[in-house]
Amino acid sequence: MKKRLFLALALGLVLVAGLLLWAAIDEPEPVELSTEPLRIKRYHGGLSIDLFSLIPQSELDHLFVGNPWSPDSELEALPVFKTPYAPSPQIEAAVTEKVYAIADQLKLAITPKDSSWNSYVFDGGDLWCRSDGLVMLSYRPLPSSFSKRLQGKTTKGNTFEEKKEVGNYFLKKYARTFGVKDPQISAPAGVLTSYSNYIGFHSGSGTLAEQIAAFHFQRVDFLLEEDYLTICFQYAQLPEEIGMYPVISVEKAQQMLKDGSYSNYPGNSDDPVAESPPSAENIVFTTLLYDTYHYDTAIPFYLFYAPSESRSRVTGETLYRVYYVPAIDLSYIENPEIFGPGFEKKP
């Protein structure tokens, strides 16, 4: 009996030690952020202050359509990435290889135009790939096969439902070429301003965390004008992952907002907070997005939209301000003060 009890206790200790060891190995290292990344503005994905500080009321219903995250999402952790758009010879070589592979699938006979800019030409268009992984393919003018099917349709100034008609056409034509599994139609994160003409898709397969990452870093977007088409896509490889980090709940983020731990201007902690934080009742829209622009590490933020004291100079309608709260538990951020006032101490 004593022998059995001893064996049971020993086995229990081994299991506990194993669990503790597993937890220690799986525990992500704290991240120290810097505001000195290579600042390349993106046509999709991530946040940019000039895009999202204030928006008119009429655009609230069209924010980040297709984002896999919703306030009802059950999400415990998200990957944190190194700034995904820093050029490197390795990415450049991989992108060039990808470009030739896609050109071959689309039956485009491309020839180098300017090696210093990684640009190519083909009969009826041009192709440009950046060393950070962004590729832009333009048909000018539209091929007859497109123009007949898309006569009178563009992505400019249309409703999202109208854009979906265009998107579904390209979805059937290009999803396999670009290797997007279970493609989901969506609008780019920059849909509100200069990139409102785009419609695109991202992979809807995998876990919710994987879908959110694909929405940001593995999109294929289309800009269709009356006489040309531009396809923008990211080299189909996620940026280097630092680790999986616990995500705070929306409720905790709202409490941080109430307590003053938020920012109106990510990436610039010297800017004063523009207005007092809104009450929970005044928050009209909430989403989650990665900031891929302001720091050397891409981390997710909660975005809370509420009426501001400002009005549109053009229409007179109320403008809505966005309040940013880091979605990663601050205990995993070495220097939370980088987010500005209210973040001087770890909670």
Image (cartoon, grey):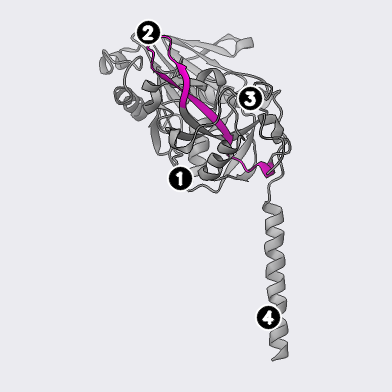
Q: CA distance from mark 1 to mark 4?
A: 41 Å
Label 4 SS: helix
Whether 179 is drawn above or below 59: the answer is below
Residue under pointer 2: 141
- Label 4 Cα neighbours within 10 Å, binned few <14 / some 14-19 / many ≥20: few
- Can residue 246 be spotted in the picture? yes
Is 148 positioned to the left or the right of 92 in the image? Answer: left
- Label 1 Cα neighbours within 10 Å, binned few <14 / some 14-19 / many ≥20: few
- Residue located at (53% from left, 26% from top): 234
Among the 4 quarters of the image, the one containing residue 58: top left
Q: Give the number of the disc on residue 294.
A: 3
**Which badge, 3 or 4, is on the more N-terminal residue?**
4
- Which amino acid, by three-letter code, is at mark 3? His
Among the 4 quarters of the image, the one containing residue 3: bottom right
Label 3 SS: loop
**Which badge, 4 or 2, is on the more N-terminal residue?**
4
Q: If the image is split into quadrants, where does the C terminus sit?
A: top right
Is 328 colored magenta in this rendering?
yes
